[in-house]
Image (cartoon, rainbow, N blue to C red):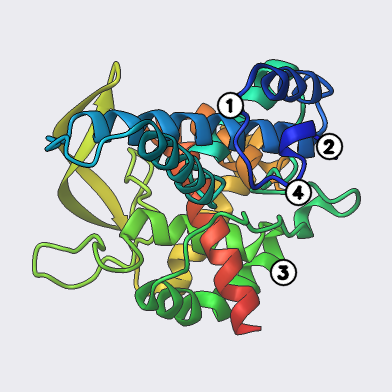
Amino acid sequence: MSFGAISNSQALAADAQSLGNLKMEAGKSSPQAIQEAAKQFESLFMRELLKSMREATVKSGMLDSPGGDLGTDLLDQQFAVQMSGQPGGLSDLIAQQLKRQMGTPPADTAKTDAVAPTKPLAARPAVSKTARAPTESQSDFVQQHSKVANEIERTSGIPASYMLGQAGHETGWGKHQIKLKDGSPSHNLFGIKAGANWTGKVAEVTTTEYVNGTAQKRVARFRAYDSYADSFKDYARLISESPRYAKAREQTGSAHAYATGLQKAGYATDPEYAAKLSRAINTTLQIRRAQA
């Protein structure tokens, strides 16, 4: 790619001809041209910034001369070029804005999930490329419950990673589990409440509910189990047998779609529940692939 006076990408498009060439190349909408244009815009910005800094500096005037001013200007140009185009810098943001304005798709769009063409119940979404590295507590939680989750997946068809991710999200990866009055664990990993038809043990705790988008503290009754395995079994039974979660069951090929289905069905009142659950599932997928 040629930009005339700035063909080697180490010079600054400071004259009218170079700026004209820059606009013409950027208008072609190629990723390389857009990235170069973004770098040059950043360079121009950095040059003006350096110029303003120098003008704000108090000078004695003893060494001022036209030649010295020219040398300083050329030096600032080189500094501006060297400071531009760094990963994560201003040029990346400019390039993204230019691509959106020109309708050019991003070169590397990370997907948080992928739908398998066959056997949706056994689908394994792709892990987001921008996901954070799992913590030790998250890895320990997934490893602790993977065996029972795998067993429930075989009988229910609900992906083990989905259940592990939701259990991790609901309990803060095991750090904030629901407890009975005597302090013993309720083994309720999924935050399932005890309705009128529940005849088992109950744990009453203060929780956060969202009413019309506003968070409110309320005392709620939650189901309690004799083991974590019973919690997984009850969750799978709830999702598999309740008509309200029928659409969510059909979306197990996509972590995001499954999480959205649960939110729409009223599994939780948090308006951001689907997004949070999707991230937790992707974290679980990342952990299980590392542990495999």
Percent x, y of residue 41: 56, 29
Along the polypeptide, which appears first: circle 4 or circle 1? 1
Residue at 76% over, 54% down: 121
Residue tagged by mark 4? 114
Which residue bears the numbered disc 2? Answer: 2
Q: Say few, some or many: other residues with alpha carbon within 10 Å of mark 4 (under 14 / 14 to 19 / 20 or more).
A: some
Task: Please say whether residue 232 is visible from this viewpoint.
Answer: yes
Image quarter of residue 288: bottom right
Q: Badge 3: few (under 14), some or many (20 or more) residues near its Cα, within 10 Å?
A: few
Q: Mark 1 and mark 2: span between their CA atoms?
A: 16 Å
Res 154 label: 3
Q: Nearer the viewer, mark 1 or mark 2?
A: 1
Are the two marked residues, 1 and 2, in contact with CB atoms closer than 8 angstroms? no
Question: Which residue: 29% across, 28% down?
Answer: 52
Look at the numbered disc 1 and give the secondary structure of its residue: loop
Label 3 sits on what residue type?
Arg
Query: Quadrant where the C terminus lies?
Result: bottom right
Image side of residue 118 versus residue 280, left or right: right
Taking 24 as reference, is 134 above or below it? below
Query: Please, what secondary structure does the residue beneath circle 3 have?
Result: helix
- What's under tag 4, amino acid-wise? Ala
Side of 90 relative to 99 (left or right): left
User: In which image quadrant can residue 119 be found?
Assistant: bottom right
